[in-house]
Amino acid sequence: AQKITQTQPGMFVQEKEAVTLDCTYDTSDQSYGLFWYKQPSSGEMIFLIYQGSYDEQNATEGRYSLNFQKARKSANLVISASQLGDSAMYFCAMREGRRSQGNLIFGKGTKLSVKP
Amino acid sequence: GAVVSQHPSRVICKSGTSVKIECRSLDFQATTMFWYRQFPKQSLMLMATSNEGSKATYEQGVEKDKFLINHASLTLSTLTVTSAHPEDSSFYICSASYRETIQETQYFGPGTRLLVL
């Protein structure tokens, strides 16, 4: 079974509008971390936002916010006021367990295209 | 944020040759580094976990004799693709974790595109 599921292979959004990228996860650990990364065509992985399993509040970083619904095991990324530069692949990832230096498990990604 | 560099960014080599890729954490000490591989239009797949001063831990299906990993210092890990073949052509990307971190963030290098002819 997939640990991280991103059901949207591709998404389109109009510039200046908000968009939600879906991510669900599967783990039996009580302690885990959830991440979102952006990968433009250049290939670099850009860290966007992090949510710890014990964090009670949804994480926010500028235009990025994470809609964390623990009971549903979902960690959707919300990008507000989309910009043309937001066009990229977006990956949801999870690290299981308490080890802060554990590896990340990635979803298959969602390709976001921002239309002018 | 923290900076991780990779060298080279792009390499083309002949089949049968070996290629070394370096991953450096520039402004922090990384006790653990990770090596991922990404095929076109696919996700990142973990190859191995590299710990400073000890042998790397490889994921199932990754040949340790083909993908040699050395983590000689707290700021440098190297991946050597030995006797490269065309099927090894891929995007190789490393990441590093802080020794002690609050946010538990992993920072990625810019990646290395390997093309084996």
Image (cartoon, rainbow, N blue to C red):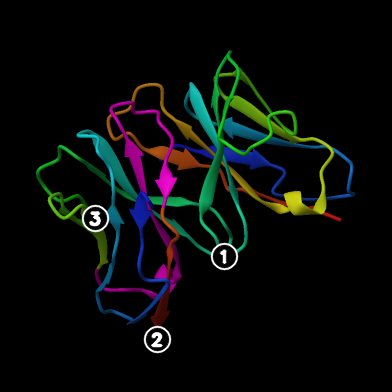
Question: Of helix, strand and loop, which one carries label 1?
Answer: loop
Q: Nearer the viewer, residue B21 or A80?
A: B21
Q: Which residue is labeled 2 in the image? A: A116
Please tell me which residue is depicted at 62% across the width and 62% down the height of the picture. B40
Crowding near the residue tagged with mark 1, few <14, some 14–19, many ≥20 C-alpha atoms within 10 Å: few
The answer for which chain carries disc 1 is B
Q: Quadrant of the C terminus of chain B?
A: bottom right
Residue B74 at x, y percent in the picture: 54, 19
Per the rendered image, the range of residues in magenta is: A80-106
Q: Residue at x 32, y 36 (%)?
A: A96
| Mark number, residue B41 | 1
Q: Mark 2, chain letter?
A: A
In primary-sequence order, the first of circles 2 and 3 is 3
Distance CA(mark 1)–CA(mark 3): 22 Å
Q: Is residue A37 left or right of residue A45?
A: left
> Is A37 left, or right, of B102 in this rendering?
right
Q: Position of residue A46 (x, y in %)?
A: 44, 52
Instruction: Examine the rendering and report whether any part of residue B30 can be seen.
Output: no
Q: Under tag 2, what secondary structure? A: loop
